[in-house]
Image: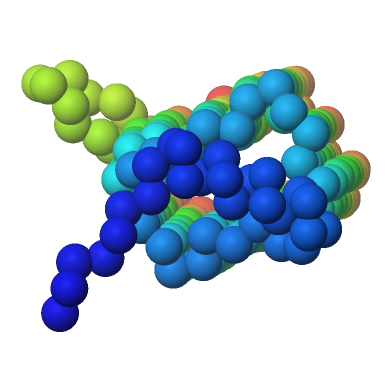
Amino acid sequence: MAQQNILVQAEIEHELKRAEREERDINFRGKVLAGLTINDRIINGKLDLEAATILGSVSLEKSVYKQDINLKNAIIMGSLFCGSAIFEKDIIARQTIIKNVANFVGAKVMGSLLFQNIEVNGFLSLTKADIKGNVILTQAKINDSYQAGLIIQGDGYFNNTVIGGDLDVSEAFIEGSFNMQSAFVKGNLNLNGTKIQEFLLLKEADIKGHINLEKTIYRELIK
């Protein structure tokens, strides 16, 4: 079998421009990319990375995305950076594997984050993010990451996060702490059956709906 072509940034830019011109989805479905950087831009089409393999990191920072981001079944060998980006639809990352951290600090999402069965190695941060819809992290895994002799704890950072719907983190595994200090959740918080190796921090969190901590395991609850 011939080795699959690895798309470099010049080829990625060609697809971005062609999709814009033809008013269609940006098609990287099942492709192998050296990395992906889309910063400080407006992207009108759906970004389709379903079942893609990205050999480096993905940076979507400070851009506006008018349609869905589809990362379902994708493998990102580096990190996922989405800081200060605006997503006008959903971000779909079901069964996605991210070998390093996933950082959405200060991002705005008009739709939902659909992250069922996602695996992150290193922290997942939604610090100061504003999500209008739901955040679904059922059966997610946030693992510690070991790099150059250093340990990046598998923490979930939701401090100062605003969620307009539900936050469902049921049956998940978090190797570090789950930090929801000063978070706001308009809907329900579901941590049913989730295992948190370190601390569950709910200090000054404002949860308007029901909080489900049935069968939740943690070292200590801080509230």
Tell me which corner region of the image, top left, top right, bottom left or bottom right, holds residue 203: top right
Specify whether residue 130 is in view. Answer: yes
Q: Is residue 128 left or right of residue 132?
A: left
Query: Who's the residue at 76% across and 41% down the image?
Result: 43
Q: Is residue 89 left or right of residue 119?
A: right
Instruction: Report the colour scheme.
Output: rainbow
Residue 167's spot in the image, x, y percent? 72, 51
Residue 95's spot in the image, x, y percent? 46, 66
Determine the residue located farthest toward the left in the rendered image. Answer: 149
Query: Who's the residue at 18% across and 27% down the image?
Result: 147
Residue 201's spot in the image, x, y percent? 57, 28
Tell me which corner region of the image, top left, top right, bottom left or bottom right, holds residue 121: top left
Q: Nearer the viewer, residue 103 or 66?
A: 66
Q: How many marks?
A: 0
Specify whether residue 196 is in view. Answer: no
Q: Split into 4 quadrants, where in the image is the N terminus?
A: bottom left
Q: Is residue 194 left or right of residue 223?
A: left
Residue 104's spot in the image, x, y percent? 62, 31
Q: Is residue 71 left or right of residue 219?
A: right
Q: Nearer the viewer, residue 137 or 32?
A: 32
